[in-house]
Structure formats: C-alpha cells, structure tokens
Image (spheres, rainbow, N blue to C red):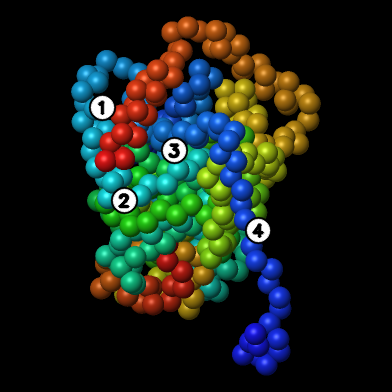
Amino acid sequence: FALAPQGLLRTSVSHSFLSFASITGACRAIQKLTRVRVVDNSALGNTPYHRPPKCIHVYNKTGVGKVGDKILLAIKGEKKKALIVGHKMPGPPMTPRFDSNNVVLIEDNGNPIGTRIKTPIPYILRRREGEFSKVLAIARNFV
Amino acid sequence: RISSHGEPAKFQPPPKPVIIDKRKQREERRFLSPEFIPPRGRTDPFKFYIERKDMIQRRKVFNIPEFYVGSVLAVTTADPCANDKVSRFVGICIQRGGKGLGATFVLRNVIEDQGVEICYELYNPRIQAIEVLKLEKRLDDNLMYLRDALPEYSTFDVNMKPVTHLDHEEIPVNKLQVRMKPKPWSKRWERPKYNIKGIKFELPEKKMKEAQKWSQPWLEFDMLREYDTSKIEEKIWKEVSEELKK
C-alpha cells in the first residue's frame, strides 16, 4: 500500500554559488505505528515501560492524523484514545511545528485523564472549543 | 533625592554622549531584504516589479525591521483563537525563505523542554509587530542544525529585554560553535554540501574524512550556477529606497 506523500518540499537557496539547498524529506504526521509522546501528567503516560506508546488507529477518513485528531494508542499493553496536540510535520504557515509528536490521553467521552499539561499547545485547538474544552482547561501554555 | 524607601537614591552619573564622527565619510550601511532580489528564471521582470510595489506598499504601513538569520525576534500576531486576540512568540530566526510577497522566516525556541518552530510570512496582514530583540548574524545562512544541537542553544527567554544596537555600527557576527546531541541527526551536517561553520564537530577524524568523500569541488567553478546579483541589487535598492522615502 502506498499513501500519497503529503509532505512539503521546502527549498531555501542563498545567493552564493556554494548554495545550501535544504530539503526536508516528505514527512507525514501521525499515522499507524508512529511512536508518540504523552505530554499530560497522567500515571499511564508517565510510568516507564519497555515499549513506547504507539498509534494503532487514526479516527479520520485519511489514515493521517494532524493536530486536533483523535487516535487510538497502545500504552502498557492497553488501548487508550488520545488527542494529537502537536506533530513534527510542518503545517500551514503561522502554525507551530513541534520537535516531537505530542499527544494527550483522553477517555471515550472526551475527558482528559491527566490533570495538567505543561508543554505548549497550539492556539488552533481553541477553534473547536466545544469538543476540547476540558483539554484546553488543563493546558497551561499556548503557542 | 530621597526615594520611597527612605534611603538616599544611588547617584546615577549622566549618560555619556555618543559622538558620531561625521567628518569621516562613513559608507551608509545599506540593507536590502533578501526577498526583494528576484530569483533567476524566465519570468517577466514586470511580475517582480508589481510584487515589489505591493511589498513597498505594505512596508509603508507596517515596519519590517532589518534582521538576519541568527537574530532573536519577537512577533505578535492577531489570532481569533487567542486569549487577548494577540499571540506573541519569541525565537531565533533559523531560516529566511521565499521571494516576493511569500517571503517567510522560521523562528525557533524551546518552551518547557519542547522545541517549537513557527514559520511566519513577512507580508501576512495578521502580523501586528515584529521586534528585533537581538540583531546579530551567525556563521551560517541556515541554522536548521539547531534542531539536532543541545536545547540550551535554542532557548531564549520570552521576556528578554531588547539589546540596543547603534545605527552606524556593523552587525556583530556571533562566532558561536554549537555542540550537538549524539548522532543520528536529522541531516548529516558534517557533509560538505551543507558547508556549516557553526558546529563544533566532536566526531572522530575518520568520520570527518569519510564525510569529505561527498564533496563536489567542481561546483565552485561551475559557471552556469553563478548568479551575480550586485547590479540587480543596486537597481532595486535605488528603487525601493526612493519609494520608501516618499
């Protein structure tokens, strides 16, 4: 199976003849089997385990999860739903790009499991305040 | 003068006057933002002329300061989703890309141990203010290697005070050599195609020699790759400075 490449090829060329063309390879955001980083202070997310938490399903028409999508995570041998709050893939301009794929653990009804989120959350999630009001309430920093 | 504490205030000597020697003929420092220089190609120069007019129009309304890759900037944007409808981000400029109205710059900062990069468009009307907190250059044009460097080199205080820079002085070049996290890196920065001077490579000699295998020494002499922009820059500088003075 081959997913259509969604990454952007960004080139920046300086004017010296020894030009430095920086091309980021095609990178997708969160999909099945991506290792993610849980950023809230829940016990499930922070206790060490010999396997990192991995995404096993994305609740999306395309199998690629961006900020604000719900995914199913396999943590410590159990399945848990989570909300994507930041990914390594560059998005539209004026939106933040994080250095790690960040995720917040969530129940089926949308209640977050942890009580505090220290890492910065993008402001775009505020648009869907109805669904994510409880997650946004526990977030401390916004970018 | 007695301050509110009840103790006499510490004597502050008057600030020393800055003497600008006008007798010596100083060449005025000209800075033409890189997005004004048209890329090499077969497009009609008229398209670039119209774009430049629009860019100058925007610059008349909104001040875009002079900055380089490696300077620390603070950008406030209008955001309907933010608390006060404005959001402020402070970071070091790691890349300036794009030409014309689509010119972008990427700011990077590390907040709460999480590296965040935001790509801003210079001419986006949502941007309300761009302040240069520290104006300086680095040894490279592109600081993407900061992603693989130790996080201390990308952390900047969100409330840092702007460092004053006098107009007639030259822009300081920060010759900092950055220390990297252990390999693997996102790109093989030791390879000569990136030509990075700002990393302190702690790799063994063998690896550095092996990286030189990918060097392409003929590129320097390739005449078809030369793009001399000095004359174009002169013309555009005259045009832009005249329009902005009006």
Q: Are marks 4 and 1 on the same chain?
A: yes
> From the viewer's perspective, is the residue at label 4 or at label 1 nearer?
4
Res B187 seen here: no
**N-term mark: 4 or 2:** 4
**Which residue is nearer to you in this view: A67 or A114?**
A67
State how far apart marks 3 and 2 are (Cα).
Answer: 19 Å
Outermost residue, front side: B23
Residue that carries the numbered disc 1 in the rendered image: B48
> From the viewer's perspective, is the residue at label 3 or at label 1 nearer?
1
Residue that carries the numbered disc 4 in the rendered image: B16
Q: Residue at x 44, y 19 (%)?
A: B230
* Label at residue B62: 2
For this view, does A78 lie left or right of residue A50? Answer: left
Look at label 2 and name its amino acid. Phe
Q: Residue at x 47, y 49 (%)?
A: B107
Circle 1 chain = B
Question: How many discs mark residues in the rendered view?
Answer: 4
State how far apart marks 4 and 2 are (Cα).
Answer: 33 Å
Q: Are marks 2 and 1 on the same chain?
A: yes
Outermost residue, bottom side: B6
Percent across and percent down for residue B160 are: 56, 62
* Label at residue B96: 3
